[in-house]
Amino acid sequence: MYPSPLPSAEMSPAGPEMMTLFAQVLPYSRLFIGIEVEEYLALLHGCMVRDTKPGEVLIAPGGINHNVMLILSGSLSIHLGHYSSEAVGVVKAGESVGELSIIGHSLTSAWVVSTCAGKLLVIDETRLWAMIDKVPAIARNLLLIMAGWITSVNRRVLEQREQIDMLQEVSRIDSLTGLFNRRWFDESLHRLLHGRQPARVVSLILLDIDHFKKFNDAHGHPGGDQALRVLADVLKASVRPNDVAARYGGEEFALILPETTLQAALVVAERIRHSILEQPIRAADGQILPSITISLGIAESESDITPEQLTERADGKLYQAKNEGRNRICF
């Protein structure tokens, strides 16, 4: 259950001792920029001062707010979603909260929580509008404050969008090779086969490293990982922008080639097979490891073929290539 702001919070009229604090803090407040001290002190005569406690909720989302609260001492944290979530901002002495809901005649949209014991100058809605009528510069300052809040929110939304994009990117990329992962391969093949015209062909190449377990045993996992990276680099250099190169699992890889016939896919596969033979595999210590060979199987789509059927055909051709002696292509 969410806590609610405390209407019974301890408040008292601003007495003479508070005027000293006002004179120290308010000249630096954005609300009173460009306004003579004597002018706004007269406007604030009779305002209430509220004492805050650590963790006290001052504003909760979805409520009606009637006050601008200007921090005289202490600080407040701003939270979205839940008051215990990470703060999206901290408001310090001389700054204020509550303007947006009053000026916009809207419900509150965030949690405002006191981070420590402090004091707030509470300017009620009626007094705020009276102040704006008497000193138009306050309206200008409020607009600047609100613009700052909106910019901050926009920046937060942009950061969240970038985080989402980054997570989506991570979720479809294999961290070792930089190729697409199995999940993205499955989604891409399904999308291409179900969204294509019957006359538009898709070819699929499945390949894996010959005797990879022996290579791994001889040169350790770091050496094996480097072999996988080298093969991935060859695949990246061999495909077009609209092709999909993916790590299918372990030492097995896949290439989805849209708008590519079986014969055209064979040319691509042969180029890859020759390229990997010529690629040096360099260990972390600089040692040159033995080159690797690969076996490849190719299948071409037909009318109404499913992703599973196309993958099964390519996989069958891959195993045929391995059974016939490896370092070859079957189609």
Image (cartoon, helix red, strand yellow):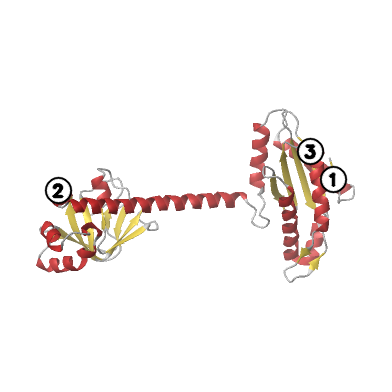
Residue at the spot of label 1: 329
Q: Secondary structure at mark 1?
A: strand
Give the camera-side residue of 239 and 181: 239
The residue lying at 82 percent from left, 58 percent from top is 278
Task: Assess disc 2: are there few (<14), some (14-19) or many (≥20) residues with their C-alpha within 10 Å of its C-alpha.
Answer: few
On screen, residue 125 above or below 299: below
Q: Secondary structure at mark 2?
A: helix
- The numbered disc on residue 299 is 3
Q: Amino acid at mark 2?
A: Asp
The residue lying at 16 percent from left, 48 percent from top is 129
- The numbered disc on residue 171 is none
**Label whose residue precedes the other's in the sequence (3 or 2):** 2
Q: Is residue 203 left or right of residue 93?
A: right
| Labels 3, 2: front one | 2
The quarter of the rendered structure image containing the C terminus is top right
| Percent x, y of residue 257 | 72, 40
| Percent x, y of residue 227 | 76, 60
**Label whose residue precedes the other's in the sequence (1 or 3):** 3
Q: Amino acid at mark 1?
A: Ile
Residue at the spot of label 2: 133
